[in-house]
Image: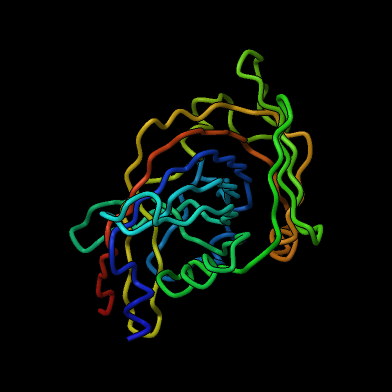
Amino acid sequence: MLDALKNHPFGVAARLERTVVLAFAVPRAELQALLPPYLELDTFQDEWAFLAVAMVETRALRPQGFPAWAGQNFLLLGYRIFVRHVDARGKRLRGLYILGSETDKRSMTLLGNLFTHYRYVHKRIRSTHEGHALSISANDGSTEVIIYDDPEREVALPIGSPFPTWNEARRYVGPLPFTFSYDARHQRMLTVEGSRANWTPRPVQVQRWHFAFLDALGFSELRLANAFIMEHVPYAWKRGTLEDMRP
């Protein structure tokens, strides 16, 4: 019964009030080792794979059909890999695989782990916005991000980014159309389809970043590849669908 609950048993709606996404380029073999079967990396120039950290100020997260006032407001940090999956119809889907999630709200930790496979942990996180500077940090020092967001100012790609232009970098922002989880016990792939509106990623300059979660993964190389901010995005997730992957 509890296993079934974790498979996104109902649709969900929310408003992503402010989302900051930092994407990192990682040697492909090191990221591939973190993926379950039947998922492959979504690479750039067949060399780099990408892991993103999304920092999301979420408003009114609720089951579809419920009023906004019944929803959860919280701050979310999500660590996810850009992947592709070929489903039973032979359709090639592009999406994300979640490595872990952190939130500032205990109730969201409980509900997130009850209804998803996204590995929520509670952490005291705060977001502050002063002028063009936005800071996101955790009280225990495990997370610190400072970005500069001035819509009137041209932003250069991060030094060492594998992307030659912001247009190519924009392909690795998210949220993407699909999110995947793999049930190794039953050999099933869970796919959750999302839809978004008012999605206009804007490049931002990163002044400082540190994620203990990424440090623990021990990558030999980790390059900041892009950084974007998005605001006021209505988002919805459909009920999850299961696909039997047994031969």
Left or right: residue 80 compared with residue 180: right
Return the x and y of residue 229 as percentages of the image width and height: 57, 33
49 and 101: which is toward the camera: 101
Report the residue at 31% width, 75% height from top: 188
* Residue 209 placement (x, y as % from top left): 76, 44
- State which quarter of the image contains the C terminus: bottom left
In the image, 244: left or right of 98?
left
**Which residue is at the far right?**
141
User: Which quadrant of the rendered structure holds the N terminus?
Assistant: bottom left
Residue 80 vs 9, above or below: the answer is above
Image vertical order of residue 83 relative to residue 199, above or below: below
- Image vertical order of residue 127 relative to residue 34, above or below: above
- Image position, residue 230 (x, y; %): 52, 33
Q: Residue at x 34, y 67 (%)?
A: 8
Pick whichever, 128 or 43, lies toward us: 128
User: Residue shown at 79%/58% (left/top)?
Assistant: 139
- The location of residue 33, given as percent across then percent down, is 56, 67
Q: Residue visible at 52% across and 65% down? A: 108
Q: Please tell me which residue lies in front, 181 or 150.
A: 150
